[in-house]
């Protein structure tokens, strides 16, 4: 007996999984008390239409005679909760913080024993001796209720629960209540941390309207990909803590964008608002030339007017082009030196913008945006993430590093970049490529994005094995959701929202 008690004490204090703890505790106490059946309930409160409702939820149950077992290995029990009221024994014990120990529920006149009798009439079971113990933590808060049924002697005859057993089970119940209370506190703190980080993410995403789903999509991709690797790979196994660390890193990875100039961060075209100044300058020149043409009665001036129109059309074209080839660059160079009526067609800033070969950013603007990684670390360096999330900020601060050392800000190489960071980097690029909400580039189809990632593997920039597994991960998504071109973010966010809803439901 002593060995069993000590053994259960060790098991419950070592178990990290909240749900598994229920089963271990119920199995252990029914064994120690040598009883035929038992149920463990967890106390829950929730607001329903503004009214606080209280319940006892079934989390684990054992009935050896009926061979009914549930919730013993961490699985959820889908039984309707018991209303927390004076009318049933378990709630009664919880409300009044009392231990109930009855020899025979059929010989006790108290109406709180109607429940077991009703249960017996439905199942054919015979409940006799019952021990009900509330699980109270050190703040006197009710955590749950343990109900043990039909204590047996060594011959299998039902006997009352002895005072000694009552004391032992009460002592173990206090211990488990304390452990569960600490776990709930940790869960609450993690939820608080997660929701605070989420608010920060929402603030960044509101700042980048063209890229509003990026952080949440990258986070969802990392979460789902890690699940995929755990299921399908032999090389990788991520514990739930390691998953949480990567999730946090993904949430944080672009926090530094808060410190980046909005005009640069959201620059939609090469010239952005400068195109408006160019248009009015050209219109001004066109009017002046037109006046000259009529005043001097010089039809040749029409050629200059036409050339001006053609130059503006070309500039408009370059402004929105994804890539500038050599031919276009030659004409841009010509325009940079061109004057009309003694006026330079372009300012120095406009010339620099038009010289951008690819994308919408000048070298200086790109460097400013790249500072977001350093800013992420600086903004968050004083946050106490605790032991568990200690590595999250490091991973977040390295999401633009590449295996060949050409990334930034530290130009790390190979082994200096851990697996979680490599995953974050791949997902960050994958979302940037497939995103449908960026005005400066058309949406890249999923297959094309994958082949860009593959070329980055060939260049030694990304992890070959992980990108290899990404293929299978994408295929799984395609099989389930069909064509995903332009729909990656929407799909990932939908999957994550469904997962969250299910989790909330399971929580209750
Ligand atoms: Fe970034
Ligand atoms: Fe990013």
Image (cartoon, rainbow, N blue to C red):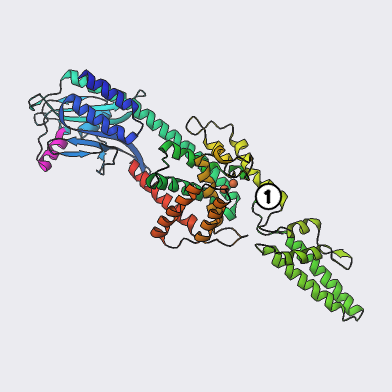
Q: Is residue 397 visible?
A: yes
> Per the image, is 340 magenta?
no
Question: Viewer-proximal residue, 146 or 270?
Answer: 270
Quarter of the image that includes the C terminus: top left
- Which residue sits furthest right? 296
Q: Is residue 49 visible?
A: no
Residue named by callout 1? 366
Quarter of the image that includes the N terminus: top left
Counting every numbered tag in the picture gives 1
**On screen, residue 119 above or below 107:** below
In x, y percent, where is residue 393?
Answer: 55, 37
In x, y percent, where is residue 37?
Answer: 16, 33
Residue drawn at x 66%, y 55% as measured from the top left: 267
In x, y percent, where is residue 338?
Answer: 84, 65
In x, y percent, where is residue 407?
Answer: 62, 45
Neighbours of disc 1 within 10 Å: few (<14), some (14-19), many (20+): few
> Per the image, is 118 magenta?
yes
Residue drawn at x 71%, y 57% as measured from the top left: 356
Question: Viewer-proximal residue, 484 or 158?
Answer: 484
Specify the principal SS of the magenta part: helix
Question: Viewer-proximal residue, 463 or 201?
Answer: 463
Residue drawn at x 15%, y 23% as measured from the top left: 161
Q: Quadrant of residue 201?
A: top right
| First to last magenta residue range | 113-125
**On screen, residue 286 above or below 387:** below
In terms of secondary structure, where does tag 1 sit? Answer: helix
Horizontal placement of 487 versus 355: left or right? left
Q: Is mark 1 within 8 Å of ligand 1?
A: no
Question: Viewer-proximal residue, 248 or 284?
Answer: 248
């Amino acid at each position: 007996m002593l060995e069993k008690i000590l053994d259960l004490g060790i098991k419950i204090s070592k178990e990290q999984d909240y749900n598994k703890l229920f089963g271990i505790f119920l199995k252990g106490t029914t064994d120690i008390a040598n009883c035929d059946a038992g149920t463990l309930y967890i106390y829950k409160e929730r607001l329903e239409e503004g009214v606080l409702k209280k319940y006892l939820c079934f989390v684990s149950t054992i009935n050896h005679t009926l061979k009914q077992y549930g919730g013993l290995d961490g699985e959820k029990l889908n039984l309707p909760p018991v209303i927390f009221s004076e009318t049933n024994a378990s709630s009664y014990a919880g409300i009044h913080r009392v231990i109930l120990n009855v020899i025979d529920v059929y010989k006790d006149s108290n109406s709180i024993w109607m429940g077991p009798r009703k249960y017996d009439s439905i199942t054919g079971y015979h409940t006799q001796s019952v021990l009900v113990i509330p699980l109270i933590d050190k703040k006197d808060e009710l955590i749950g209720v343990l109900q043990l049924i039909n204590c047996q002697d060594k011959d299998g005859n039902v006997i009352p629960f002895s005072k000694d057993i009552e004391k032992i089970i009460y002592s173990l119940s206090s211990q488990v209540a304390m452990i569960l209370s600490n776990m709930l506190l940790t869960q609450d703190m993690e939820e608080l941390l997660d929701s605070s980080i989420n608010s920060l993410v929402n603030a960044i995403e509101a700042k980048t309207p063209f890229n509003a789903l990026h952080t949440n999509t990258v986070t969802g991709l990392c979460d789902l990909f890690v699940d995929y690797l755990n299921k399908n790979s032999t090389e990788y196994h991520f514990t739930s803590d390691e998953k949480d660390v990567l999730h946090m890193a993904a949430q944080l990875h672009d926090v530094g964008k808060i410190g980046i100039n909005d005009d640069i961060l959201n620059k939609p075209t090469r010239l952005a608002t400068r195109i408006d100044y160019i248009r009015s300058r050209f219109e001004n020149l066109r009017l002046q030339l037109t006046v000259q043409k009529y005043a001097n009665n010089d039809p040749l001036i029409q050629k200059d007017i036409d050339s001006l129109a053609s130059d503006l059309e070309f500039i408009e074209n370059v402004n929105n082009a994804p890539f500038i080839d050599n031919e276009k660059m030659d004409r841009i160079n010509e325009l940079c030196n061109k004057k009309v009526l003694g006026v330079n067609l372009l300012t120095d800033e406009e010339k620099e913008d038009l010289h951008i070969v690819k994308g919408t950013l000048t070298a200086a603007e790109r460097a400013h945006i790249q500072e977001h990684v350093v800013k992420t670390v600086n903004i968050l360096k004083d946050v106490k993430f605790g032991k568990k999330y200690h590595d999250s900020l490091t991973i977040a601060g390295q999401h633009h590093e590449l295996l060949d050392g050409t990334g930034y800000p530290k130009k790390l190489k190979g082994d200096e970049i851990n697996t979680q960071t490599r995953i974050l980097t791949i997902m960050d690029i994958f979302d940037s490529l497939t995103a449908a909400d960026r005005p400066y580039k058309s949406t890249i189809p999923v297959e094309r994005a994958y082949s860009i990632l593959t070329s980055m593997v060939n260049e030694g920039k990304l992890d070959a094995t992980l990108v290899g597994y990404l293929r299978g991960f994408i295929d799984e998504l395609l099989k389930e959701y069909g064509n995903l071109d332009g729909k990656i973010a929407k799909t990932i966010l939908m999957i994550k929202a469904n997962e969250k809803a299910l989790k909330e439901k399971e929580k209750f």
